[in-house]
Amino acid sequence: MNNKNNLTEAAISNFKDIVSLMESNRTTVEGEVYVGSKFLVTIGCNPFFRPIIDEQSPVCMNVARVVIIRSGWCEPVIGFKKYRCGPGDMLFINWGVMLNGDSFGANTTFDGITVTEEYMKLVFGGRMPEVFLSPGLCFSVHLSEREQTVWKQYVRTLYNLAHIRNIDPVVIRSLFVSALNFTESMYKSKGSDNHIAWSRNKRAIERFIRLVNDHAKTEHELDFYASQLDMTTHYLGMIIKKDTGTTAKEWIDKTLCVLLQLELRHTSKPLKVIADEFNFVSLSSFCKFFKRRTGMTASAYRLLSDHEE
């Protein structure tokens, strides 16, 4: 089953909030947990994040989560509907999903991963699989014993790799890509879809996100996307903000920034060449944009090691 929901007047809890909650309640956190700067890996972990939901609902945690329920059950309330998940169920919740509540059975534990939106885009080289582009996507599917074993092996290997000192981050990113592709495969083979029931606005939002994914490198202004969707910039901006909690320009800028980070990290092109290829009016405008988005110059970012990124 799956649901794509609106994000309206929800509290926002980011990755740092989740990590801070876990760190301040270490004695009550069960299982094995690896805490990275952009992701969490949890094995046999209890729902330590529950206070965020209980105290702030409706809330968007602003991270993507994929878990398999190992024991017990959970019943997240998404779009004012309850979704009961038990042992062997895979639950995916994207960063735009609004949680109106969640219930948990006694001794409920999960095996899974939590990643920031930015990290998810980085591991996919700035071009995520289409299924993950919708910020409001969530789904639950039941896995066979063999499929559960595969997922547990993904999570265990990610956990072990993350604990290896000086491991090349590319190794971890590659396994994240594989694990998320496996998640996509489970969704496509077992999930159902309800695109037919989407409203005109919902369809427009999905098209906008795909257009940004395809064209953000060279098209930086909202006018282009509004013209492609046959809408005014005002109306497009209004429905994007209402549905996702993020402005349309922010969608464009954050996608563009990820693409620039990848270009700086993986090529030795002069900054002027990058500015031209990314359709900036000048090198200065490129440098100002990058500094505003990241807090550092493009040259300084290029000198960072993968471990510092």
Image (tube, rainbow, N blue to C red):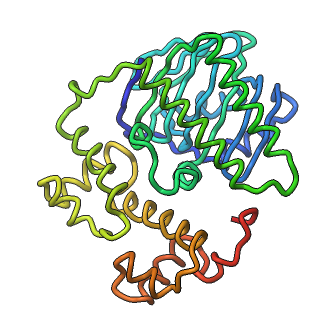
Picture coordinates of residue 287, whole percent (x, y):
49, 83
Rendered residue at 71%/50% (across/down): 171
Picture coordinates of residue 137, whole percent (x, y):
42, 33
Q: Is residue 271 above or below residue 304?
A: below
Rendered residue at 32%/62% (across/down): 215
Foreground: 35 or 78?
Answer: 35
Picture coordinates of residue 225, whole percent (x, y):
23, 59
Foreground: 28 or 216?
Answer: 216
The quadrant of the picture occupied by the C terminus is bottom right
Extreme residue toward the left, this view? 230
Rendered residue at 72%/37% (across/down): 41
Rendered residue at 25%/52% (across/down): 238
The quadrant of the picture occupied by the N terminus is top left
Give the side of residue 196 with respect to residue 261, left or right.
Answer: left
Picture coordinates of residue 181, whole percent (x, y):
53, 36
Q: Is residue 302 above or below residue 284?
A: above
In terms of image quadrants, where is residue 136? top left
In terms of image quadrants, where is residue 255? bottom left
Give the side of residue 245 with respect to residue 303, left or right.
Answer: left
Tally of marks: 0
Q: Is residue 62 above or below residue 138?
A: below
